[in-house]
Image (spheres, grey):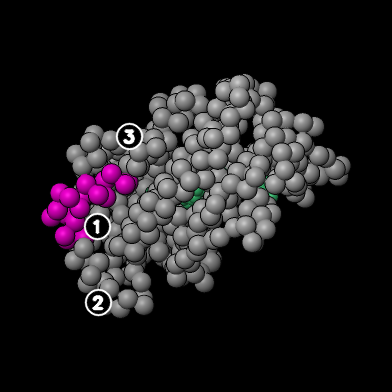
């Protein structure tokens, strides 16, 4: 089989790239190791930056998002028994965020891709990439026991942190940067009314918590947990009790609890790959970087990578000159935004989580910073402009 762009991975990055290329008449085949149902049962991100919404608009996959997404003009922070609101609209020049689950965006993009007739190979095994240092890269895979080869002009590695793309690059050609945080998040999805119309982040000496949502009747909440914990260590009763402990008394009293319809533990890490391009291979999304989820940036960063990569590929194929200038600039452009977003995600994680190694002094410094933030327009503007998303 032959295509112009071989995309590895059918998550948000791969699907968005496939859709943007399709709209420009560029052929792309997605090779995915799982199947549609497996991908759609994964519960992940929930908050979209305004820039991500504009990219989804450009990809013509945002109709349901505008109908069902929840526009948020701010969020609350609980600390020291109080609850303060950060007004995004005021401090980020009128910008807002939209709460609309990654699962739903993935569903919308899968539906659009099926309607377009573009090819996605699901349940692909033994996916391997070859000759990406040449102008004739290729992908091999097994499907239903038969071996296949896909020849292409370019390969987009959109296969996430554990994918094959980044791992196929010789260690001499790649540099990685990593911080693994000494805690994780236990997340619970429940058919319970969200305790607030907007998100509530909580800093408490017993740990971090977050009250988010997926709809006016479906909550998505998180509590900081030990890296060694398993979901068996967290029956719902223990989860809701730990969450209430971290909220101000009034909010805790209002919290509606209920059974989990999904429960999962996510480790937290900061991770960056440099560069993000190797000959005909381009890495995008979690394949190239991971952010701790406190800043709600993971999927948004995948979208901005695809914004840059799709523009460069479209320019290459439509410029007539087979121009490669933009392709040559992809890694530099994407990494400039990746590093700023990594910094913000690290900052929010460090500010809101309990870090045992920092002791009581660390807790006091966190509290002092939170009190300073809510007394400072400049500090709130910094938080707001990063949270709504830096310019693309
Ligand atoms: P993805 O990992 O979503 O997609 C990669 C795709 O490639 C997958 O479908 C995978 O099956 C496929 N693949 C992997 N290896 C392959 C191979 N060898 N061959 C073929 N296909 C292969 N972000 C937030 O903003 N907020 C959150 O709360 C949040 N929570 C998260 C919780 C968890 C457990 C995880 C893992 C991530 C979370 N994230 C969160 C980040 C997440 O949303 C990612 O940023 C987002 O999924 C990135 O999208 P992709 O880059 O497309 O990678
Ligand atoms: C979510 O709704 O899953 C979510 C929201 C904000 C975050 C992280 C996760 O910072």
Residue at 48% across / 46% down in the picture? 332
Q: Quadrant of residue 248?
A: bottom left
Q: Which mark is residue 71?
A: 3
Q: Does dot 3 land on a helix, a strand or a loop?
A: strand
Quadrant (top left, top right, bottom left, bottom right) of the C terminus: top left
Label of residue 16 in the image? none
Badges 3 and 2: C-beta atoms under 8 Å apart? no
Alpha carbon distance from label 1 to label 2: 19 Å
Looking at the image, residue 265 sits to the left or right of residue 155; the answer is left
* Magenta region includes residue 100: no
Instruction: Please tell me whether the stretch drawn in magenta is mainly helix, strand or loop.
Output: helix
Q: Nearer the viewer, mark 1 or mark 2?
A: 2
- Foreground of the two, 343 or 69: 343
**What are the residue bounds of the magenta stretch?**
370-387
Q: Which residue is mark 2?
A: 361
Of the numbered discs 1 and 2, the one sitting upstream in the chain is 1
Q: State the quadrant of the N terminus.
A: top right
Q: Position of residue 57 (x, y in %)?
A: 45, 26
- In the figure, is residue 83 to the left or right of 159? left
> In the structure shown, which secondary structural element does the residue marked by tag 2 occupy?
helix
Q: Is residue 379 magenta?
A: yes
């Amino acid at each position: 089989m032959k295509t112009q762009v071989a995309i590895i991975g059918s998550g948000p990055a791969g699907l968005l790239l496939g859709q943007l290329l399709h709209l420009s008449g560029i052929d792309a085949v997605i090779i995915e190791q799982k199947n549609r149902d497996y991908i759609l049962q994964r519960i992940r991100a929930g908050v979209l930056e305004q820039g991500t919404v504009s990219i989804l608009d450009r990809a013509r996959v945002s109709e349901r998002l505008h109908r069902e997404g929840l526009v948020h003009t701010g969020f609350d922070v609980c600390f020291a028994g109080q609850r303060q609101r950060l007004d995004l609209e005021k401090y980020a020049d009128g910008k807002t965020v939209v709460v609309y689950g990654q699962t739903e965006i993935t569903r919308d993009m899968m539906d659009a891709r099926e309607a377009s007739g573009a090819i996605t190979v699901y349940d692909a095994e033994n996916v391997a990439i070859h000759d990406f240092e040449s102008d004739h890269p290729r992908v091999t895979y097994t499907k239903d026991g038969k071996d296949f080869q896909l020849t292409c002009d370019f390969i987009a590695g959109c296969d996430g942190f554990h994918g094959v793309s980044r791992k196929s690059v010789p260690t001499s050609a790649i540099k990685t940067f990593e911080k693994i945080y000494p805690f994780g998040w236990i997340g619970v999805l429940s058919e319970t009314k969200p305790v607030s119309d907007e998100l509530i982040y909580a800093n408490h000496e017993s740990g971090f918590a977050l009250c988010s949502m997926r709809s006016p009747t479906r909550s998505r909440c998180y509590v900081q947990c030990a890296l060694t914990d398993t979901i068996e260590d967290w029956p719902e009763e223990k989860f809701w009790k730990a969450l209430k402990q971290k909220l101000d008394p009034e909010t805790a009293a209002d919290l509606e609890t209920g059974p989990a319809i999904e429960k999962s533990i996510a480790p937290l890490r900061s991770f960056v790959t440099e560069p993000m391009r190797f000959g005909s291979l381009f890495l995008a999304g979690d394949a190239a970087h991971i952010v701790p989820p406190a800043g709600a940036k993971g999927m948004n960063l995948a979208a901005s990578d695809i914004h840059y990569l799709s523009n460069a590929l479209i320019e290459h194929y439509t410029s007539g000159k087979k121009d490669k200038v933009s392709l040559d600039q992809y890694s530099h452009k994407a990494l400039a935004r990746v590093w700023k977003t990594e910094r913000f995600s690290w900052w929010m994680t460090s500010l809101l989580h309990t870090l045992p190694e920092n002791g009581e002094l660390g807790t006091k410094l966190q509290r002092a910073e939170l009190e300073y933030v809510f007394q400072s327009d400049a500090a709130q503007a910094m938080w707001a402009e990063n949270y709504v998303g830096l310019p693309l």
